[in-house]
Image (spheres, rainbow, N blue to C red):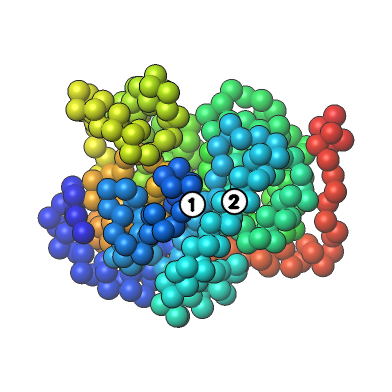
Amino acid sequence: MSTGRLGTAAADRLEEARELLAGHPVVDGHNDLPWALRQHVRYDLDRLDIGADQTGVLHTDLARLRAGAVGAQFWSVYVPCALTGDNAVSATLEQIDIVDQLLERYGSELAPALTAADMEAARGQGRIASLKGAEGGHSINNSLATLRAFHALGVRYMTLTHNDNNDWADSATDEPGVGGLSAFGREVVREMNRCGMLVDLSHVAATTMRDALDATTAPVIFSHSSSRAVCDHPRNIPDDVLERLPANGGVAMATFVPKFILPAAVEWTARADDNLRAHGFDHLDTTAEAMRLHRAFEAENPRPIATVATVADHLDHMREVAGVDHIGIGGDYDGTAFSPAGLDDVAGYPNLIAELLHRGWSRPDLAKLTWSNAVRVLGDAEAVSRDLRSRTAPSNATIDVLDA
């Protein structure tokens, strides 16, 4: 495992980091392996076997998950905003299905998990608890029944938007639409609370974050977002929102994507993405052809390099503002073309823990960061759901009526 730009003092802490992670492994909030499998091989697991070393092709395989001490993974069942209506629903079902195929194929390593208790049971078995998270509310096609169906199929969080607005929520990277959440958007949040599906506020506009916190009765998460005060990118979390997490009980899971964490990488990535689009590729494409274009661009335009310390800077600030009980980790592996030095792939988590140990983080605080906070937030959402289900029926509200 490469230590990349890990300082010598932090590198000396690696053994201590691995020891801590043996008891308190990483719960990672977001990994885009399912979409990468669709892009690369259209879900043909014989052609792209994560039981074998996929270094250079993917950020993720089983051996590197083990090396990184990942104990639980939220697998993103993302579909792009270009897919709309029933096409978005069908593609999300295909994403859900490939996670189920992975769980069946690699059952000795991956354990299906629906609850906090399942996560703890998987840890006791030495398997990686595997949960599903839908990325983008467009995937439910404005249907609360579809939302409930996804929950029945194992989806345990939904990111309210992706990069574009949907009909009822504003995205961080689009122009203002409904001004945060519409009336139907607030009903989506309430129905997620009733189902026991975590409300994920990564990707949403700050107005949407605030509206969701006003509407929810359950803890929220940010599955892969960092601090806007440290790197002023709209995908990150403003301090006033971080300050609300203790009262809500939620968890903000810091991401590793360089363009969200390193100010110098923001402008460079915008130009690199424009270069991809000019050659007919989506800016999120990480296939071999797209990466060749990225590497050629990088050869002529040196890339600013984020490091383990860059991520640690975000976590230091998020801990200061939200408190150690309300932070976690969401790497966004296989959903980004580039990653920080020392966090090159899913094997790198011990490097981050070593850096935080070097900075004086206590072992109990690190155990909260890696494991306990994420398990607690899911358990708390389950408790809210049990209460709401005992008192309220499923909502059959429609966007046509609520947002008329």
| Total marks in image | 2
For disc 2, the neighbor class at 10 Å (few under 14, some 14 to 19, many from 20) is: some
User: Foreground: 2 or 60?
Assistant: 60
Q: In front here: 42 or 10?
A: 42
Q: Secondary structure at mark 1?
A: loop
Give me the residue at 23% from left, 70% from top: 16
- In the picture, measured across the screen, residue 42 lies left or right of residue 148, that is left
Element type at marker 2? Answer: helix
Q: Is residue 52 visible?
A: yes
Mark 1 lies on residue: 43
In the picture shown, does residue 81 fall above or below 94?
above
The reply to whether dot 2 and dot 1 touch (C-beta < 8 Å) is yes
Amino acid under disc 1: Tyr
Which quarter of the figure has residue 335? top left
What x and y, as percent, mark residue 286?
38, 39
Which residue in the structure is indicated by mark 2? 94
- The earlier-in-sequence mark between 2 and 1 is 1
Q: Quadrant of residue 307?
A: top left
Q: Is residue 127 left or right of residue 184?
A: left
Can residue 343 be seen from the camera position used here? no
Q: Is residue 69 above or below residue 98?
A: below
Identify which amino acid the numbered label 2 is placed on. Answer: Glu
Q: Is residue 176 above or below residue 353?
A: above
Q: Nearer the viewer, residue 330 or 82?
A: 82
